[in-house]
Image (cartoon, helix red, strand yellow):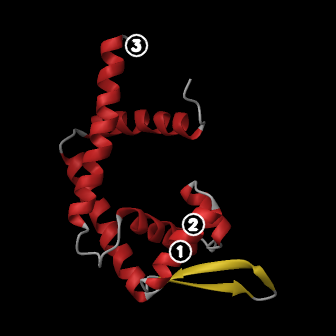
Amino acid sequence: MTPTQREELNRFFVRVFNQILAREEQALSGAGGLSVKELHVLEAVSGCAAQGCNTMTQIAGALSIRVSTLTTAVNTLVSKGCLERGEEPGDRRVVRVRLTARGEEASRLHARFHQRMVESAAGCLEEDEVEILLRSLRRLERFFRSDRTD
């Protein structure tokens, strides 16, 4: 990779990441005062619950964060009426988290934003370009999951 390509790729990552966050914040301003990070926690809770793996440890794993970090976010979202938690019968160390009706509505709003964003972005590409993009993004995802930055 040339220095020019390296710089362009870096600018691309930073610019696109920031643009997505800005659009997400703008589109979700009606989500009842929830931050984008809080909406991502709701999304993870929803996804984990659908798979029957909605313990604090499992949700933290899905978000790639520590349980202590998730605990802070869950406490905030419980106080905002979006989540409820309960201990596992027979083992009080296991805490399960569920969306409330308010949390489900915010999660639906967030999912609609992502659906519209993906459809709009893919709409400016040809079918073969979408497949090439997906193949490239899968490789990048594997790289970032490997924790290699050298």
- Identify the residue shown where x is 18% and y is 43%: 124
Q: Earlier in the sequence, mark 2 or mark 3?
A: 3
Q: Nearer the viewer, mark 3 or mark 1?
A: 1
**Residue 17 left/right relative to 46:** left
- Identify the residue shown where x is 27% and y is 64%: 113
Q: Give the alpha-carbon distance from disc 1 to disc 2, as whole Å.
A: 6 Å
Quadrant in which the C terminus is drawn? top right
Q: Residue furthest left?
A: 124
- Identify the residue shown where x is 42% and y is 83%: 80
Q: Nearer the viewer, residue 132 or 77?
A: 77
Quadrant in which the N terminus is drawn? top left
- Give the numbered dot on residue 74: 1
**Residue 116 left/right relative to 38:** left
- Give the numbered dot on residue 70: 2
Based on the displayed image, in which of its 4 quarters is residue 55 positioned?
A: bottom right
Amino acid beneath label 2: Leu
Q: Nearer the viewer, mark 2 or mark 3?
A: 2
**Residue 115 left/right relative to 82:** left
Q: Is residue 2 above or below residue 122?
A: above
Q: Residues at badges 1 and 2 in contact (C-beta under 8 Å)?
A: yes
Q: Identify the residue position indicated by label 3 in the image.
A: 1
Q: Nearer the viewer, residue 11 or 145?
A: 11
Residue 85 position, x and y percent, is 59, 84
Q: Secondary structure at mark 1?
A: helix
Amino acid beneath label 3: Met
